[in-house]
Image (spheres, rainbow, N blue to C red):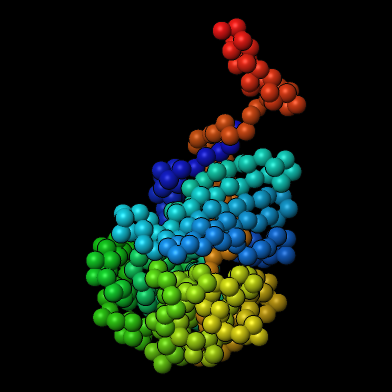
Amino acid sequence: MTQFVGVNDLSKMVGTMGPRRFLRRLVEYLADDFARWGQFEKVPRIASHSPIGVIELMPTSDGALYSFKYVNGHPGNPKQGKLTVTAFGVLSDVATGYPLLISEMTLLTALRTAATSAYAAKLLARPESRVMALIGAGAQSEFQTLAFQEVLGIKEVVVFDPDPAVVKKYMRNAAGFGLTLRAASSVEPAVAGADMVTVCTAVKGRQALVSRDMLKPGVHINAIGGDCPGKTELDRNILDDAQVFVEFTPQTRIEGEIQQMGAEFGVTELWEVETGRKAGRTDTNAVTVFDSVGFAVEDFSALRLVHDLMEGRGKRLDLVPDLGNPKDLYGALLGGVEMGMRVA
C-alpha cells in the first residue's frame, strides 16, 4: 500500500505542527540535501509550454530514493477561479521501484519555495537584515513572510502589488504574524529601505520591475518570479553589479533572471556555499541575488520530510497490486472475472 497525503492531510499536519516549525524543519532538510548535492541525479525540468502556461515534470534521485513532481503554471487561471500553480509529487524506493508516497504539492510547493528562499537568504543576506520588501502579494507572499520571519528574524515587511485587493488580502492574512506591515504605492518606495527584497509576480514576459538605482548597498534579492523562458523581473543592470547565486545552472540559464545574460556570465550554485567550496557574500555592501527557479532536489527534500512525518499514519492507496504470486498478475486479478464471464 502506498502512503497518500492529500490537501486536507497536509493542511492538518502543518496546522498541528505549526507552519513556522514545519518551515524550519524543511530548511534543515534542504541544508542536508544541498550538502550532499553530488549524490543527486540532476537534469533541467521537462517542460511542455503552451501560449497560456506550462506543465512540467521535475525528477531526481539520490540513489536510494527517487522523486518527481508534476507542476503547472498558468497565470490566467485566477480569472477562472483556479490556482496559478498546482502540483503533486511521488517519492519512490529505488531498490524496488515501488512508490512510497503520493502527496499533494500545491501547498507543499509554496512551503518549500518559501523555505528555500529563507535557506538561501540565511547563507547570503547580511545577518542584521530585518526589513523585507515584497513585490507581489499573491499566493506565495504569506509563506515567504513566515519563512523569513522564522529563519531570518525579520521585523518589518513593506509590500507592493498593483492589485489593491491582493494587498488587502495579504495584510489580512499577515496581521497576526507579529510584524510591522506597510503598503507601498509603487516598487521604488517599497524597496528603497529594504535589507532583503523578494520579487514574485505571475505575469509572463520580460519585466524590469526593480533596477539597481532603487536599492541600498548590501541588499539581498530573492528573485523567484522569473521561472520560465522569456519571463524575468529584474533589470539586468542589477545582475551586472551583483553576486548571483542559483540552484542548478543549466536550468537557471533557461528559465531564470540570468537568461538575460550571456553563457559566460558567472554564477555560484547554492550547494557550493553550503559546503564551503565557494564563498557567499564577500562584501557587506555587495548586492546578492538568489536567482531561484525551483529545482527537483528541493521537492525531494519536501517529500522526504512529509514521508518521515507521516510514516505509519494517514491514508493508504492500493496503487500497486499485492499478489501471493508476483508472476501471476493475470490469474490473481482477472482470472476469476474471465471465468465468471464464461459461466454466465
Residue at position x 51%, y 49% from top?
88
**Image quarter hosting the N terminus:** top right
Residue at position x 31%, y 85% from top?
189
Q: Where does the image place residue 240, in percent across and percent down from the top left? A: 54, 90
In the picture provided, is 180 more to the left or to the right than 145? left
Q: Nearer the viewer, residue 28 or 46?
A: 46
All told, the count of numbered labels is: 0
Q: Nearer the viewer, residue 153 or 118?
A: 118
Q: Where does the image place residue 207, in percent across and percent down from the top left? A: 42, 80
Q: Residue reaching furthest top? A: 343
Q: Where does the image place residue 193, in percent across and percent down from the top left? A: 36, 86
Specify whether residue 122 is in view.
Answer: no
Residue at position x 60%, y 52% from top?
68
**Image quarter hosting the C terminus:** top right
Q: Is residue 328 above or below residue 141?
A: above
Q: Nearer the viewer, residue 57 or 127?
A: 57
Residue at position x 57%, y 84% from top?
261
Q: Quadrant of residue 272?
A: bottom right
Q: Quadrant of residue 146?
A: bottom left
Q: Is residue 268 above or below residue 286?
A: above
Specify whether residue 96 is in view.
Answer: yes
Q: Where does the image place residue 99, in percent across and percent down from the top left? A: 63, 41
